[in-house]
Amino acid sequence: MSFLVENMRREFGGCAGNIAYTLKLLGGAPVICAAIGDDGAEYRDRMAGFGIGLDALRAVPGSFTANCHITTDLDDNQITSFHAGAMFQSQVNDVTAVDNIALGIVAPDGRDGMFKHARGFASKQIPFIFDPGQAMPAFLGDEIAELIGMADYLSVNDYEAEMIAQKTGRAIESFAPGLNALIVTLGAQGSRVYTDGRMVDVPVVPASALVDPTGCGDAFRAGLLYGIAHGWSVEKACKLGSLVGSIKIAERGGQNHNFTEPAIRARFAEVWGERW
Ligand SMILES: Nc1ncnc2c1ncn2[C@@H]1O[C@H](COP(=O)(O)OP(=O)(O)OP(=O)(O)O)[C@@H](O)[C@H]1O
Ligand SMILES: [Mg+2]
């Protein structure tokens, strides 16, 4: 099959890059633990330019950096091909070798890397969020339950929550008592937090424009990480996630939104009537 494609654009993406990008904007100190290929220098330099920690970034010779081609027709039907490349070697990394980690996130990555990083955080008693996302098909029900069992937080969208329930044969809420918090994001419906035996709904923040939802989940997680790492309640952290998700949706791609630290602090207080 062959298509003539008139317009083309290229975006930087991937969960680690997206999350680190927003977390850095918020004033956090993200360290990316991921694998890139022979073509990864441009992306690495871009991240370095933002001041994102790259000590745990590894190059896998003879591979490409994970990449995805999406062809969209005039009716918005899409054909996607994803090449994992270096990502399937992400177990070359070792999170336990990174110093001074306050909080981790095991987000979609190669299966072996996700297991290794979860075990690494657990062995060093570094709290972490498990975010299986698009990697869900790589795990059996028992494996998902094992990974959740090692984690302190579980963050999924509504579709992923349903997949976990199907794979494990357990209602998603049944995982909450074993966690500090279970967070289920619901797109335009906001998010639902299960923590301390309670359930709290966090509304969305109205967006200035609805341009592209891609990467809203990653932006939300950056807010969640920032808040939890700074000792905020999970509900307050989700309010920050909701705010940055609404800012992200007004731009195409996962790394084109922008704000300054003073601006986001002021906006947070304005939107939620709560101090940063
Ligand atoms: N239409 C919207 N308006 C405002 N905020 C939104 C909207 N859609 C999503 N958000 C915010 O972003 C959060 C995460 O979105 P969502 O649940 O769609 O994540 P996701 O499905 O993991 O997204 P993706 O995987 O595409 O990044 C939501 O909980 C919400 O706070
Ligand atoms: Mg997602």
Image (cartoon, grey):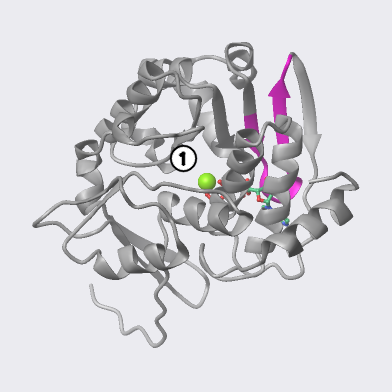
Foreground: 69 or 267? 267
32 vs 276, left or right, is left
Instruction: Say which residue appears at 51% left-offset and 67% top-offset.
Output: 253
From this view, report whether residue 172 is shown above or below residue 221.
above
Residue ranking furthest to the front: 100
Q: Position of residue 127 (x, y in %)?
A: 50, 24
* Number of numbered callouts drawn: 1
Foreground: 258 or 206? 258
Q: Please tell me whether residue 55 belongs to the stretch shown in magenta.
A: no
Residue bearing the label numbered 1: 133
Figure quadrant of the N terminus? bottom left
From this view, report whether residue 264 is shown above or below residue 157.
below
Instruction: Say which residue appears at 65% left-offset and 36% top-offset.
Output: 230
Quadrant of the rendered structure where residue 70 is? bottom left
Q: Position of residue 73 (x, y in %)?
A: 45, 75
Q: Secondary structure at mark 1?
A: helix
Q: Over which residues does the magenta segment extend?
A: 183-196
Foreground: 17 or 191? 17
Q: Position of residue 170 (x, y in %)?
A: 54, 14
Q: Position of residue 39 (x, y in %)?
A: 20, 66
7 vs 268, left or right, is left
Foreground: 224 or 263? 263
Amino acid type at image mark 1? Gly
Instruction: Say which residue appears at 52% left-offset and 73% top-offset.
Output: 75
From this view, report whether residue 192 is shown above or below residue 243.
above
Q: Is mark 1 within 8 Å of ligand 2?
A: yes
